[in-house]
Amino acid sequence: MPSSVMPTSSQPDAQPSSDTAAVSTVALRKSYGDKTVLDGIDLRIPAGSVFALLGPNGAGKTTAVKILSTLITADGGQAQVAGHDIATSPDGVRAAIGVTGQFSAVDGLITGEENMLLMADLHHLSRSEGRRTAAELLERFDLTEAARKPASTYSGGMKRRLDLAMTLVGDPRIIFLDEPTTGLDPRSRHNMWQIIRELVSDGVTVFLTTQYLDEADELADRIAVLNDGKIVAEGSAEELKRLIPGGHIRLRFTDPAAYQSAAVALREVTRDDDAQSLHIPSDGTQRELRSILDWLDSAGIEADELTVHTPDLDDVFFALTGPTTTGTSVPAQSKETVR
């Protein structure tokens, strides 16, 4: 998808307040022929937060971004972005947002600085203001030394940083990042993560789609999982992990007598006699952990090591979007929302 949405003015005529949603949708729908891509999705994203939309290829993530950034129209439902209805006030939406798409909008035939100045012209900034904004953003994204080199000579990480810097020329308060780190090396990905955190600390709202589950785990305040056009689960990363069975507390002992006593007394444990450890099914909550510690104290049993294991987002993703190797699955028809 294109990497930038051109506003009709350099500043939005309204911004979401802290007690309103930066982005909200109700029963949003989109089809292509007989294929339903979005089947009535509801979202509410608070201002100044990171929201991650996960889903397999073809789930409708990019379609949702295109609709919310007014690049395409929805077939049904309602949506507001920065307080503007996407159907009746698309210009207001475009003035308030920035979009960094899957494919870079950087022009490789001109320099990084010229790319920035071109974007400043498109935002109707004066020549002096455009040069000042370009210089500040190039410095912020550590591109000053490369600013006068052709963008075609930039590495993948540098091009993505330049792409995001171009998106920020108009000072958007809501940014859509559609798989922004695809193809980047680990260091470049972590640099991009830090940039996103800095944006949010400045009050910017980030709508993120990604194929990297660790990325959503690191960055997102809330995550929604999209499958077959429906939101099948929504919550924080920790809340989503608790939806999936498989969590446990592991107790390891060096004293054989203590190990045997605990194994006999505790119910529903899995023993590992070689390692002298016990696995106790657990959702990882503080209450459950305290209960086990209190029991150990009352019984006078001391474990040498206690670790809590919870499912990760990979487990959540596979369980919510299809069967896993263990057969665990969550029906796609029933949405799980954790508040």
Image: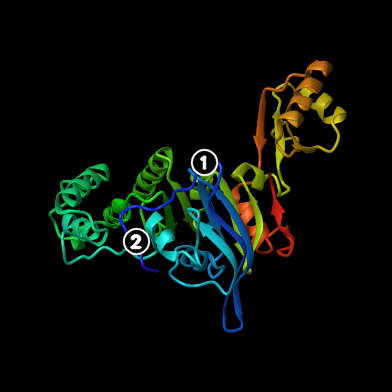
Instruction: Report which residue position mark 1 lands on.
Output: 18
Which comes sooner in the sequence, label 2 or label 1?
Answer: 2
> Looking at the rendering, in which quadrant would you find the N terminus?
bottom left
Please give the name of the residue rendered at 16% of the width and 52% of the height, measured from the top-left corner.
147
Question: Horizontal and vertical percent for residue 108?
Answer: 21, 65
Query: At x 34% / y 52%, what residue is drawn?
Result: 11
Please name whichever residue, 203 or 140, is drawn nearer the observer in this view of the structure: 203
* Along the viewing direction, whichever of 212 and 172 lies nearer the viewer: 172
Image height of 34 relative to 95, above or below: below
Q: In which quarter of the image is the C terminus?
A: top right
Q: In this view, does 28 lie to the left or right of 189?
A: right
Q: In which quarter of the image is residue 153?
A: bottom left
Pointers 2 and 1 in contact (CB under 8 A)?
Answer: no
Residue 268, percent from left and from top: 84, 38
User: Relative to 108, does residue 190 appear above or below in the rendering?
Assistant: above
Type of amino acid under label 1: Ser
Residue at the left extreme?
148
What residue is shown with label 2?
7
